Image: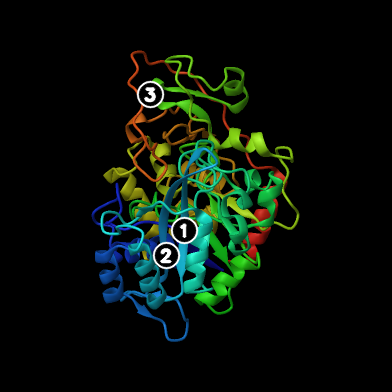
Amino acid sequence: MQIADFHLHSKYSRACSKDLDIKNLEKWGRIKGIDILGTADYTHPKWIVELKSNLKEDPEEKGIYVSAGGQQFILSTEISLIYSEGGKGRRIHNVVLAPNFEVVDQITEYLLTKGRIDYDGRPIFKIPCDEFTYELKKISEEIEIIPAHCLTPWFSIFGSSSGYNTVKDCFKDQTKHIHALETGMSADPAMIYRVADWRQYALVSNSDSHSFWPWRIGREATLFDMKKISYHNMIAAIRNKELSGTVEVDPSYGKYHYTGHRKCHYVTDPAAGMKIGNICPVCHSKLTVGVQARVEELADKPEGYYPEWAPPFYSLVPLSDLISGFYKYPVASKKTWAVYNELVKNGTTEFGILLRKPQDELNKLVDPKLAAIIMKNREGKIKVKPGFDGVYGIPLIHGDEEYDFDVAGGDDEEKPKKEKPVKELKVKGAKSAKPISTAKIAANQAALDKFF
């Protein structure tokens, strides 16, 4: 099985680490255990020079590029399309995969006729999604366009604040070229497949990482089972719905799972939010309607439904978060790193620890209580206090964790406009999302054993 994370960013994207370069992507991709990484941001004029200088196409695996240290890459970027349609402002982000640098150059040439590309690794254009797709398909049929983080409120195809209800509403006569949706951190396949229109698409998952640290890169990923790795085979697996599954964080971990208002420290479940008209009871402004509420609005299947034909997915909290939560150390602290390094020494990857290492071997490396937490995580049994309005959810390792408002916002899902300041701050607790069923856990583990 190949693990791929093909939606992330470079040092040239807004609000990203300035050390997010090929060297660090290579290093941490291999420590994490990611077989294929996205290059990200290939339209940026400085980054494309670095990509062409540091990556060479594998002569045996067309469309797969390799760094000096052996990390495999696929050419990818994210494009922001902001326009008005149907009396509503639309803000749609799309992941765009390309087969080679020649096609990338043609994509960039087209985008330059529509605006600038030098100010951000994820540039913005006033192009409707159907027109964008039509023009890129004229360049190459091998280009793949995937709606990014498809349910986050502010910048997605189905977002509560700027999105559509169906793929066809957005892509119109170009819908035939859309084969997959990206789940995003605040949703998972079990949520997305509750909606009839969305069930016809393959689901991919990626980190959308703005840094190379292991609690960001690869936190979500797509699983392939290719006998021969190539761009063509990856795209064929997506288009034919032949993926082996996805790695997801619990959707409650995502920053927009529940409905709420960060400024007022107010969060609520979808049903309670509906009862108050999704109006903040503290400042009386509109709440940010979360992904769970959006799914409930459009679903034709009940919670707990999952198609028999759909591939498995694995709900995992990143290893650094487990260590940080267990010891109550900051995630980037020396103490957290010491435990993390002990686990991944001697060439063991983080995914190997999270998915494969037996508990008796984990007990020899770390506190047996932490080893038990890792096993509990593998079974999808770590509950998470739901994220909302730009605030990350909190894994409930001890059960008394509180929201960390200092790390709210600052990435792709940030609101497009500043909110008005409020005078009063109040806190309201949130219910934990329902865990994945025992039957699903067993099915996931059985499928996982097939590949490892």
Q: Which residue is mark 2?
A: 76
Is residue 357 something that shows in the picture? Answer: no
Q: Is residue 315 above or below residue 358?
A: above
Dot 1: within a 10 Å radius of its alpha carbon, few (fewer than 14), some, or many (20 or more) residues?
A: many
Residue type pointed to by label 1 = Val
Measured from the top left, where is residue 227 in percent x and y?
59, 78
- Within 10 angstroms of label 3, few (less than 14), some, or many (20 or more) residues? some
What residue would you read off at disc 1?
A: 95
Viewer-nearest residue: 322 or 101: 101
Which residue position holds label 3? 263
Dot 2 or dot 1: first in sequence order is 2
In front: 105, or 300? 105
Which circle, 1 or 3, is nearer the viewer? 1
Q: Nearer the viewer, residue 51 or 396?
A: 51
SS at mark 1 in the image: strand
Where is the N terminus found, in terms of image quarters?
bottom right
Does the CB distance between marks 2 and 1 fall below 8 Å? yes
Q: Earlier in the sequence, mark 2 or mark 3?
A: 2
| Residue located 57% across and 30% down the image | 432
Q: Are marks 1 and 3 in contact (CB under 8 Å)?
A: no
Distance of mark 1 from mark 3, alpha carbons?
Answer: 30 Å
Amino acid carrying label 3: it is Lys
Above or below residue 289? Residue 311 is below
